Image (cartoon, rainbow, N blue to C red):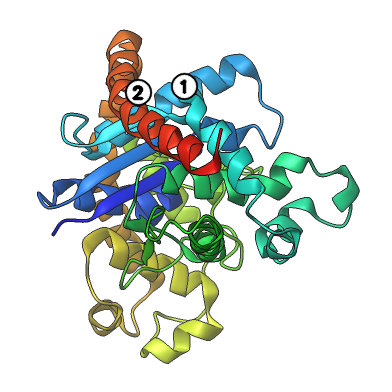
Amino acid sequence: MGKKIFSGVQPTGNLHLGNYLGAIKNFVELNNDKENDCIFCVVDLHAITVKQNPKELRNNIRETVATFVASGIDPKKSIIFNQSKITAHSEAAWILSCTARTGWLSRMTQFKEKAGKDKEKASVGLYSYPVLMAADILLYDSTHVPVGDDQKQHLELCRDIAQKFNNDYEVENFFKVPEPLIQKEFSRIMSLKDGLKKMSKSELSDLSRINLTDDADQIVNKIKKAKTDPLPMPDHKDELNQRPEAKNLIGIYSSLTDTKLENIINEFSGKNFSEFKEKLSQALVEKILPISKEINKLLSDEKFLDTILLDGYEKANKIASNKIKKIHEIMGF
């Protein structure tokens, strides 16, 4: 039996290599499996936990759709829609926030990291974000959710909420308890300027990341300037833990080419980084350039992107509205 898969990407604009290798590449593989039913959501409600420029947000929603399609997700096979169009998400988030417990939310490490020292100034939305994420997943009877390390805890919360609701209202299996889908052999993609920091669009230097809209010259230049250490390429996998920049670049190459770390280390052991960087640049240009060209082409056809979102909305709304109707019946509304 196939999996029902739900995943979301925030429309923050300027999606980069970390987004591609950490999520979108995996989405394409899941989409290509005939057994799977996939829903890919542009989670614009999640994006507003930080103040957004309305015009930029609208453009970023389209850019995220363009990136999905340019990377190989087929909108005829998978549902692609933006979250804010379907009111069931907001309604289910409120209902489930009455099931969730403040103690559960207070343990979320991502809130602590994002809110920083001054938690009093953080928005309520940033605090209750994981409840909306649970609503997103549970509305579609999702059986599996692709998650990175930073979202594992949120999925655990989603599972707890589903089980508590089912128990409270004595409706066994009404909300499916989803399983995590964790990529094997995946290295978290870090900044090209600092192997201890995650690759992010919020970092000031554009040299810290490979954007999915970069051209060949930009890609080659960024890899050439990427931080390394003075030693030659490592001889053994264990060395990577003490050498974050080497670990990051080798991890990128491994994820891009689906090559085991050991094989890469054997091939380049003791060589200069320049030789490896050349090979990495070549692999990046081969993979990223066609996506970059296709994104730019799709962005010039807003009508086409809006049609994908409208079609996705109609399909997703049917499922979500039906689930909300059943929730109303269970709760006595």
Rendered image quadrant of residue 148: bottom left
At a point 37% along the width and 52% down the height, the residue shown is 23
Contact between labelled residues 2 and 1, with CB atoms less than 8 Å apart: yes
According to the picture, the residue beneath numbered tag 1 turns out to be: 85
Q: Measured along the vertical axis of the image, is residue 278 above or below residue 209? A: below
Of all residues, the one furthest to the front in this rendering is 332
At a point 60% along the width and 51% down the height, the residue shown is 130
> Foreground residue, 177 or 57?
177
> Foreground residue, 205 or 46?
46
Amino acid type assigned to the residue bearing label 2 in the image: Tyr
Q: Which mark is residue 163?
A: none
249 left or right, relative to 315? right
Q: Position of residue 143 (x, y in %)?
A: 31, 57
Amino acid type assigned to the residue bearing label 1 in the image: Lys
Q: Position of residue 279 (x, y in %)?
A: 27, 61
According to the picture, the residue beneath numbered tag 2 turns out to be: 313
